[in-house]
């Protein structure tokens, strides 16, 4: 899952990027609304974390413009503005949730996961597809009830595929979902990780649709 972090405080931004990265997310970090607009135009983000007190154009204006152009990216406002009127205004402008600074990182991660579940239409944290079960909170994968050890990148790829069971995702879509701007990406990195996944889970768990991409399918 790939997130856009819009936060101008560099100490807070570094801490959030590190914490969300440790939780398994790919995080791109920008410090103003203009850079956020450029990033959002790519359409690759599963969720945006938005500070309101940005330099230049403020976060509320950015949010209203996003919703005005029908950008449906889930938005979690993360701000020190604690007045009830501010929270109401943010939610009415199209935010999906609102977290006040200072915040507990575990709560922030939990809220991000809840919003992503809501977007995927899931009511439970565990993703299931046939014999596969993936728990993004515990970072566990089970195949027919037996635990399977995956690397962080393998886990991220499998989670991306299981968010959309039956859908064929191209290599480019998978790259966009699990790699951030600052990460070095080899030309066949995704294929290597998918090969390792199929070796660990069985070739039938992840199917290669030749010339199109990859999918997970219930048996």
Image (cartoon, rainbow, N blue to C red):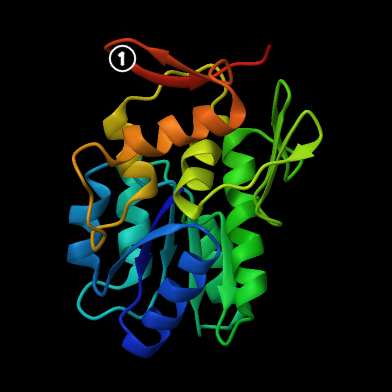
Q: Position of residue 44 (x, y in %)?
A: 32, 43
Along the line of sight, which residue is nearer the eye, 209 or 114? 209
In the picture, measured across the screen, residue 198 lies left or right of residue 55, that is right
- The residue depicted at 27 percent of the width and 50 percent of the height is 40
Question: Is the residue 67 above or below the residue 212 in the image?
Answer: below
Q: Position of residue 37 (x, y in %)?
A: 22, 56
Q: Position of residue 27 (x, y in %)?
A: 38, 61
Question: Is the residue 174 above or below the residue 165 in the image?
Answer: below
In the picture, measured across the screen, residue 61 lies left or right of residue 25, that is left
- The residue depicted at 30 percent of the width and 73 percent of the height is 58
Along the line of sight, which residue is nearer the eye, 6 or 163? 163
- The residue depicted at 48 percent of the width and 49 percent of the height is 74
Residue occupied by mark 1: 212
Q: How many marks?
A: 1
Q: Position of residue 206 (x, y in %)?
A: 52, 22
Give the quadrant of the C terminus.
Answer: top right
Along the line of sight, which residue is nearer the eye, 98 or 185? 185
Along the line of sight, which residue is nearer the eye, 88 or 164? 164
Secondary structure of the residue carrying tag 1 is: loop
As drawn, the residue found furthest toward the right would be 145
Question: Is the residue 94 above or below the residue 11 in the image?
Answer: above
In the picture, measured across the screen, residue 117 lies left or right of residue 172, that is right
Residue 213 appears in the picture as rendered: yes
- Judge the density around disc 1: few (<14), some (14-19), many (≥20) Cα neighbours within 10 Å: few
Residue 94 appears in the picture as rendered: no
């Amino acid at each position: 899952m790939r997130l856009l972090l819009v936060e101008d405080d560099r100490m807070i931004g570094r801490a959030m990027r590190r914490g969300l990265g440790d939780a398994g997310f790919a995080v791109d970090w920008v410090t103003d609304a203009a850079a956020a607009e450029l990033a959002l135009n790519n359409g690759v983000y599963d969720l945006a974390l938005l500070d309101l007190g940005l330099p230049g154009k403020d976060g509320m204006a950015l949010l209203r413009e996003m919703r005005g152009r029908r950008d449906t990216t889930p938005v979690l406002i993360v701000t020190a503005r604690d007045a009830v009127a501010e929270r109401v205004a943010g939610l009415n402008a199209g935010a999906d949730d609102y977290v006040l600074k200072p915040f507990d990182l575990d709560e922030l991660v939990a809220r991000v996961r809840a919003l992503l579940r809501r977007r995927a239409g899931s009511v439970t944290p565990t993703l299931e597809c046939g014999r596969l079960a993936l728990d993004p909170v515990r970072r566990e994968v089970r195949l027919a009830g037996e635990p399977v050890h995956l690397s962080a990148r393998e886990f991220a790829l499998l989670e991306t595929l299981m968010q959309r069971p039956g859908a064929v995702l191209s290599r480019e879509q998978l790259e966009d979902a699990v790699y951030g701007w600052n990460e070095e990406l080899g030309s066949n990195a995704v294929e290597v990780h998918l090969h390792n996944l199929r070796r660990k889970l069985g070739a039938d768990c992840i199917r290669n649709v030749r010339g199109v991409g990859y999918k997970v399918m219930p048996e």
